[in-house]
């Protein structure tokens, strides 16, 4: 479920192209949205394609505050570390951000992480990113905000095909088709990708056990729409088969999953009703090892198998009025999963089921130049606990300036993964904890938006008080072996400033963003995996059928552990990207993209051996799309 404030850069037939005005509606499902006093960023399809990155997570790093755990790219990271953090709310691999794809949860049901390989970036129409829990519409996993992905709408006889090849023996092939009839629409697409990957251990530290970390996967989805007058029915299914090599001879993982979903929508003028349901089945397998003899030998510590399944449903009713709007809803989510760890001499099984359900209401009303917002959610977290999540805010606009503010209370329940599943990264072992309590946040934010014809600027100040934050707490660190456990750490304070700027002039457009975040436990130590400063900038030149984009992303240092030891500092770094796209013929274009153009080596984790991030990667290819007559 997600939120749009539209800021697309669209070419206009004028001397100075204009930016679209800022909007403040939050998209929950495709046909229902709610007004909110939120700071929301939107990336339209063309903008997504202008940012380099094999998968969508690398492209979303252009938005300040978006990050995965441990800085790693989703192309080589272990799936369980691909939890999403916004505004630095996050100290472990679990997502504190709800990610939705066409209104349905993309977060893994067992662990909350996200398989970015499920979504082809070229088939995404737009992405909406809302930072902060300023609305009560979203429940669990929206502690730090929500991200919503929307697929391209079907078109008459649209056929697409794409192939890209790159260094490290990378191959990316995708195809899609859609068609519209009078009452029906159908679309389907598929993608296959493979790469030898790259070493994640610095060359001077590599031993005989080290291998390139890489991935190969096949993903596909299909959708059928039926529409008749005020009624619309939607069916969708997607599947993923993925294999990953985790950087040594014995460490690998694989995932197979499938989701089936349906949605019914009734549009009755000023009233709208949506009913949503889905079912997901998944099996995750992983091997873990201990590295020995200066990385010249390793031994299997355990093999892990995690089957899980989830069902969910939601009902939403929207009422629009000239001076006020209301949204009322109910949602339910049940997941069941078990982690079976097989050791050389024993077997350990941990897992169970979790049932969550909640009811919410969101209202907004106009009073002169101001719009007022009120919301509330009552949620049963699945651990014999319930949580009340209120929110309130206001927006006041005058001329080109808009002021906004909100206060809110939200939560995140621990996942089955955190409660029951152990794991290892190198020689660092992290243990589960079945006694974990939900995390909670009390937050407030205030901001100003400047909206001009060719320039936009947005400034936001925020403060989040966190209780029972789940972190990986160090129990011991001796002889190169580290033992940690997930625990509800001390309370933490997260506060900072966001700045976003966009401008267009002639054939040129530019955007820049900056995030400052100071996130500390009550003990004074900084929350691990969160840099104080991060920013990005991008410049685009477009003329005729030629487009060139250059960008930079920068991050200050961060700590690997909650004790802030000097030996566990991850230094800051900057990375430069470039994209060149040329139209060759009607419907046919060529592309060249380079990530980390300067080949900067940077550290993503310490296990305690340093693990490094993406080296220079390039890819080139062709994209073809049929143009209906």
Image (spheres, rainbow, N blue to C red):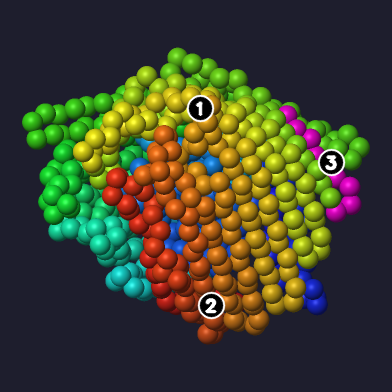
Residue 599 shows up from this direction: yes
What residue is drawn where x is 64% and y is 56%?
Answer: 513
Q: Quadrant of the C terminus?
A: bottom right
Which region of the structure is painted magenta? 392-400
Q: How many angstroms separate mark 1 from mark 2 (CA)?
A: 50 Å
Q: Residue 405 occupies which quadrant of the picture?
A: top right
Q: Is residue 162 magenta?
A: no
Magenta span: chief secondary structure: strand
Query: Which mark sits nearer the N-terminus, 1 or 3?
Result: 3
Q: Nearer the viewer, mark 1 or mark 2?
A: 1
Q: How many angstroms separate mark 1 from mark 3 (CA)?
A: 38 Å
Viewer-proximal residue among 351 and 324: 351
What residue is drawn where x is 34% and y is 22%?
Answer: 434
Please give the residue where the numbered disc 1 appears in the rendered image. 523
Please give the residue where the numbered disc 3 appears in the rendered image. 396
Q: Is residue 545 above or below residue 352?
A: below
Q: Callout 2: helix, strand or loop? A: strand
Please give the residue where the numbered disc 2 appears in the rendered image. 581
């Amino acid at each position: 479920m997600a939120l749009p404030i539209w800021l697309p850069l669209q070419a206009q037939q004028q001397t100075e192209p204009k930016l679209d005005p800022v909007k403040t509606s939050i998209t929950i499902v495709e046909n229902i949205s709610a007004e909110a006093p939120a700071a929301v960023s939107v990336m339209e399809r063309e903008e997504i394609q202008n940012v380099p990155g094999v998968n969508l997570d690398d492209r979303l790093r252009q938005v300040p505050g978006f990050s995965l755990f441990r800085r790693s790219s989703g192309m080589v990271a272990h799936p369980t570390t691909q939890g999403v953090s916004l505004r630095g709310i996050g100290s472990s691999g679990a997502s504190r951000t709800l990610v939705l794809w066409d209104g349905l949860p993309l977060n893994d049901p067992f662990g909350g992480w996200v398989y970015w390989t499920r979504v082809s970036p070229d088939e995404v129409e737009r992405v909406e990113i809302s930072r902060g829990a300023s609305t009560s519409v979203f429940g669990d996993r929206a502690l730090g905000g929500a991200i919503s992905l929307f697929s391209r709408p079907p078109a008459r006889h649209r056929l697409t095909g794409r192939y890209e090849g790159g260094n490290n023996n990378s191959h990316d092939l995708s195809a899609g088709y859609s068609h519209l009839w009078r009452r029906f629409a159908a679309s389907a697409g598929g993608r296959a990708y493979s790469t030898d990957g790259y070493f994640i251990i610095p060359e001077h530290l590599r031993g005989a056990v080290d291998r390139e970390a890489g991935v190969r996967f096949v993903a596909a989805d299909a959708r059928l729409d039926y529409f008749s007058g005020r009624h619309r029915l939607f069916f969708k299914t997607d599947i993923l088969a993925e294999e990953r090599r985790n950087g040594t001879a014995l460490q690998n993982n694989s995932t197979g999953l499938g989701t089936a979903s349906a949605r019914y929508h009734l549009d009755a003028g000023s009233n709208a009703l949506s009913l949503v349901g889905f079912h997901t089945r998944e099996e995750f397998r992983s091997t873990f090892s201990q590295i020995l003899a200066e990385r010249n030998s390793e031994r299997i510590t355990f093999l892990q198998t995690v089957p899980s399944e989830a069902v969910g449903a939601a009902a939403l009713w929207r009422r629009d009025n000239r001076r006020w709007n209301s949204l009322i809803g109910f949602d339910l989510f049940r997941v069941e999963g078990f982690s079976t760890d097989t050791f050389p001499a024993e077997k350990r099984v941990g897992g169970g089921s979790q049932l969550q359900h909640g009811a919410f209401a969101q209202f907004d009303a106009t009073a002169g130049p101001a719009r007022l917002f009120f919301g509330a959610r009552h949620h049963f977290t699945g651990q014999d606990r319930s949580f009340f999540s209120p929110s309130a805010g206001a927006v006041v606009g005058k001329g080109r300036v808009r002021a906004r503010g909100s206060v809110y209370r939200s939560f995140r329940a621990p996942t089955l993964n955190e409660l029951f599943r152990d794991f290892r990264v190198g020689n660092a072992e992290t243990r589960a904890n079945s006694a974990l309590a939900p995390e909670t946040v009390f937050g407030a934010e205030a901001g100003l938006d400047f909206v001009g014809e060719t320039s936009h600027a947005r400034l936001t100040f925020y403060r989040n008080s966190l209780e029972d934050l789940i972190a990986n707490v160090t129990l011991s660190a001796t002889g190169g072996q580290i033992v940690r456990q997930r625990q509800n750490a001390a309370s933490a304070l997260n506060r900072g400033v966001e700045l976003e700027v966009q401008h267009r002039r002639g054939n040129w457009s530019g955007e820049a963003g900056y995030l400052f975040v100071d996130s500390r436990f009550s003990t004074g130590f900084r929350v691990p995996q969160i840099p104080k400063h991060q920013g990005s900038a991008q410049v685009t030149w477009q003329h005729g059928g030629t487009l060139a984009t250059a960008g930079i992303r920068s991050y200050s240092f961060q700590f690997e552990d909650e004790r802030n030891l000097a030996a566990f500092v991850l230094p800051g770094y900057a990375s430069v990207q470039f994209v060149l796209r040329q139209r060759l013929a009607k419907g046919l274009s060529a592309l060249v993209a380079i990530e980390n153009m300067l080949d900067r080596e940077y550290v993503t984790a310490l296990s305690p051996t340093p693990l490094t991030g993406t080296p220079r990667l390039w890819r080139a290819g062709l994209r073809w799309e049929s143009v209906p007559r």
